[in-house]
Image: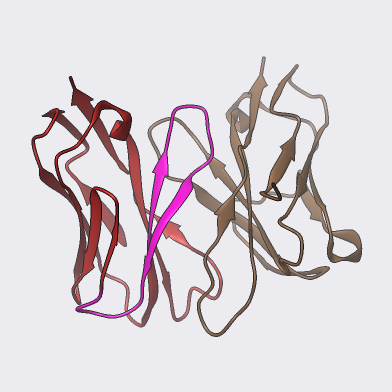
Amino acid sequence: DTGVSQDPRHKITKRGQNVTFRCDPISEHNRLYWYRQTLGQGPEFLTYFQNEAQLEKSRLLSDRFSAERPKGSFSTLEIQRTEQGDSAMYLCASSFRAGGTDTQYFGPGTRLTVL
Amino acid sequence: EDQVTQSPEALRLQEGESSSLNCSYTVSGLRGLFWYRQDPGKGPEFLFTLYSAGEEKEKERLKATLTKKESFLHITAPKPEDSATYLCAVLYSGGYQKVTFGTGTKLQVIP
């Protein structure tokens, strides 16, 4: 199956360390999104790529966060100098632009725990 | 300001007891309303996209409807495997490609 995949599924790190997550979208999907979800809340938008271009960034995405999507394929989300408040589920989604509205399909998420 | 509000926060049903979940939205220029199902520790699973008022979509025991201010997810004769959190999300003009989610309704179906 060619669903959205994310790696790793779980990450435990110490405060101050850097972490990097990877997302592989559904093949031929040209749009890719990152969200963050904390317990009891809905996913919150972080950033969005169309092909390799990062077109939108949320104010939630502080300077410690950076995302890339080289060659418009997989994407990475890096968090530098992690803080305990960064503990959350990080979700990746992808979609294919077909008209004005496209449906986003989500991956299984990466659960980050910052000690 | 909440743009997407879901109610109730939690719902407990007996197996076979039909009910509805509500999603109200205050955005203007709705481009799409989405329903997702999320199991604990997993990513949201796509269920439906609704585009305009009056539209309805069905899948097995689930039926989603849309008006100009809200959407309903009707669950007919639910089974324990329908237990999950149901998330509503909207895409609207001015939000670019950002989908805004509600906080979800946690459904528990008791055998």
Which residue appears farthest toward the right when viewing the image?
A71
> Which residue shows up at 69% across the image and 28% down it?
A9
Q: Nearer the viewer, residue B65 or A48?
A: B65
Residue A17 position in % (x across, y down) = 82, 25
Quadrant in the picture for residue A55 = bottom right
Question: How many marks on residues?
Answer: 0
Please provide the residue range marked out in magenta: B34-55
Which residue appears farthest toward the front when viewing the image?
B60
Residue B44 position in % (x across, y down) = 48, 44
Look at the image and tell me whether residue B99 can be seen: yes
* Colouring scheme applied when the structure was drawn: by chain
> Which residue shows up at 14% across the image and 28% down it?
B15
Look at the image and tell me whether residue B2 can be seen: no
Q: Nearer the viewer, residue A96 or A90?
A: A96
Residue A107 position in % (x across, y down) = 62, 44
Asked if residue A71 lies left or right of residue A45, the reply is right
Asked if residue B14 lies left or right of residue A55, the reply is left
B94 vs B39: above or below: below
Quadrant in the picture for residue A21 = top right
Q: Is residue B87 magenta?
A: no
B45 vs A56: above or below: above
Residue B8 position in % (x across, y down) = 17, 42
Q: Nearer the viewer, residue B45 or A41?
A: B45
Chain letter for the brown colouring in the rendering: A
Q: Quadrant of the C terminus of chain B?
A: top left
Asked if residue A115 lies left or right of residue B67, the reply is right
Q: Is residue B35 magenta?
A: yes
Asked if residue B32 lies left or right of residue B63, the reply is right
Quadrant in the picture for residue A12 = top right
Chain letter for the red colouring in the rendering: B
A13 vs A74: above or below: above
